[in-house]
Image: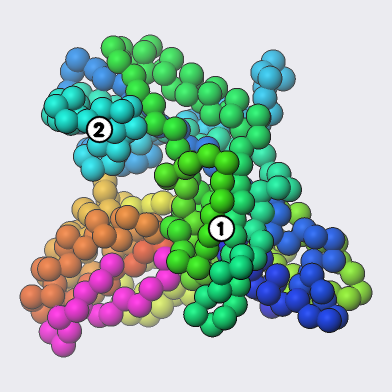
């Protein structure tokens, strides 16, 4: 049995299981449940070029490098960071400008200059710390259960990583010809999974992180970023949080070689006669992306340059072929981006099926339904 409430709700569930037999909750004999919760440092640095760059035309990330990812003994910090191209759209770009303290006429000037900027983003591997943990708050949810309280702070190594990543990105942009660079200090990806702050989570932090996001209990993966509590005779092993089975090979003698949900998903699409899936990859659907390799690319993965384009491609395919058009993108804001294409099938008889990384009810869109969602 897998407790799959992800990194906030899984420890909350276990901590709320306290009883006379398990006074600290199931699987918590060594006070490890909820500890060592991690995020990624994710600063983004942009550079201005004399020529028009139009970064919004490139899919984010288009290029990724892990040259600086491993620990460098010559540096005064452990671990490292990856660097990738990012392409913030205008609304997100305005957040970059406002982070520099600009407002009014100066903000408008930077916004009108948007096509001359190009952005790089880093993902820093912060170290696990016991004090970064989930505990139970005094506040109760609608069922009378204590909500989760997430306490988080950066250690000195984390801060050094952020500064190093910023320095490397600024050097790269200057070397490419940028005459001005700006950086927004941000964090993202609770243990590598994008999400959003749930209504039943309280957050206390030693620093403000506007971009720190927290997954809800609907996430399909289990919390696995911290060391598992040592097994004891008092804690049933089948109640321990399990590592999610995502992206594992079904060949050879892999311990996780069983069929996965993503395999069943593609199998169902084949049963429906779907030949093409118009998609844009991302963290939230990595498990499904991996399933395509195991399925010999059936149905065919047609990569779009943007998730909104994938939605329009699926609608066009459905309209002109008379078959089911399927599009897929990662979780988060891209679901709302795909919604631009929703108006067309809701007013015609074409059928299409949008799917994202967050499990949600997605109705059929066609002549019998005017409701559409991404």
Figure quadrant of residue 279: bottom left
Q: SS for tag 2?
A: helix
Q: Residue at x 79, y 66 (%)?
A: 28
Q: SS for tag 1?
A: loop
Position of 4 with respect to 274 (left or right) is right
- Check the picture and name the quadrant holding the N terminus: bottom right
Contact? badges 1 and 2 (CB < 8 Å): no
Position of 192 with respect to 363 (left or right) is right
In the rendered structure, does residue 365 fall within the stretch colored magenta?
yes
Q: CA distance from mark 1 to mark 2?
A: 30 Å
> What is the x, y in percent for residue 262?
49, 68
Q: Outermost residue toward the front? A: 138
Q: Residue at x 56, y 69 (%)?
A: 139
Residue that badge 2 annotates = 55
Q: Residue at x 25, y 32 (%)?
A: 55
Q: Nearer the viewer, residue 152 or 266?
A: 152
Magenta residues (range): 358-374
Q: Main secondary structure of the magenta part?
A: loop
Mark 2 closeness class: few <14, some 14–19, many ≥20 residues within 10 Å: some
Position of 238 with respect to 120 (left or right) is right
Residue that badge 1 annotates = 247
Figure quadrant of residue 67: top right
> What is the x, y in percent for residue 299?
36, 66
Mark 1 closeness class: few <14, some 14–19, many ≥20 residues within 10 Å: some
Residue 346 showing in the rendered view: yes
In the rendered structure, does residue 372 fall within the stretch colored magenta?
yes
Q: Outermost residue toward the left? A: 347
- Check the picture and name the quadrant holding the C terminus: bottom left
């Amino acid at each position: 049995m897998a407790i799959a409430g992800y990194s906030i709700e899984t420890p909350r569930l276990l901590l709320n299981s306290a009883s006379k037999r398990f006074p600290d909750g199931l699987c918590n004999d060594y006070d490890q449940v909820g500890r060592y919760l991690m995020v990624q440092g994710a600063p983004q640095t942009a550079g201005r070029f004399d020529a028009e760059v139009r970064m919004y035309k490139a899919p984010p990330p288009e290029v990724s490098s892990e040259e600086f990812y491993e620990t460098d003994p010559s540096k005064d910090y452990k671990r490292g960071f990856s660097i990738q191209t990012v392409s913030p759209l205008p609304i997100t770009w305005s957040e970059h400008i406002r982070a520099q303290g600009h407002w009014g006429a100066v903000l408008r000037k930077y916004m009108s200059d948007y096509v001359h900027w190009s952005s790089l983003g880093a993902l820093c591997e912060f170290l696990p710390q016991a004090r970064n943990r989930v505990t139970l708050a005094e506040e109760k949810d609608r069922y009378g259960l204590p909500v989760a309280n997430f306490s988080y702070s950066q250690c000195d190594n984390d801060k050094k990583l952020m500064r190093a990543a910023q320095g490397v990105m600024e050097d790269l942009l200057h070397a490419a010809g940028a005459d001005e660079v700006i950086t927004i200090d941000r964090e993202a990806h609770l243990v590598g999974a994008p999400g959003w702050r749930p209504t039943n989570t309280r957050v206390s932090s030693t620093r403000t992180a506007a971009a720190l996001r927290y997954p809800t209990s609907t996430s399909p993966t289990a919390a696995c970023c911290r060391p598992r509590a040592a097994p004891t005779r008092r804690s049933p092993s089948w109640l321990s949080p399990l590592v999610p089975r995502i992206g594992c090979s079904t060949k050879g003698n892999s311990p996780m070689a069983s069929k996965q949900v993503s395999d069943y998903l593609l199998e169902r699409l084949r049963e429906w006669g779907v030949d093409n899936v118009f998609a844009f990859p991302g963290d939230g659907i990595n498990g499904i992306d991996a399933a395509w390799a195991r399925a010999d690319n059936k149905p065919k993965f047609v990569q779009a340059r943007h998730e909104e384009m994938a939605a329009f491609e699926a609608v066009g395919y459905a309209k002109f072929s008379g078959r089911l058009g399927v599009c897929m993108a990662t979780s988060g804001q891209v679901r709302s981006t795909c919604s631009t294409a929703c108006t067309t099938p809701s007013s015609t008889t074409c059928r299409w099926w949008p799917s994202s990384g967050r499990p949600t009810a997605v109705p059929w869109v066609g002549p019998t339904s005017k409701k559409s969602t991404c």
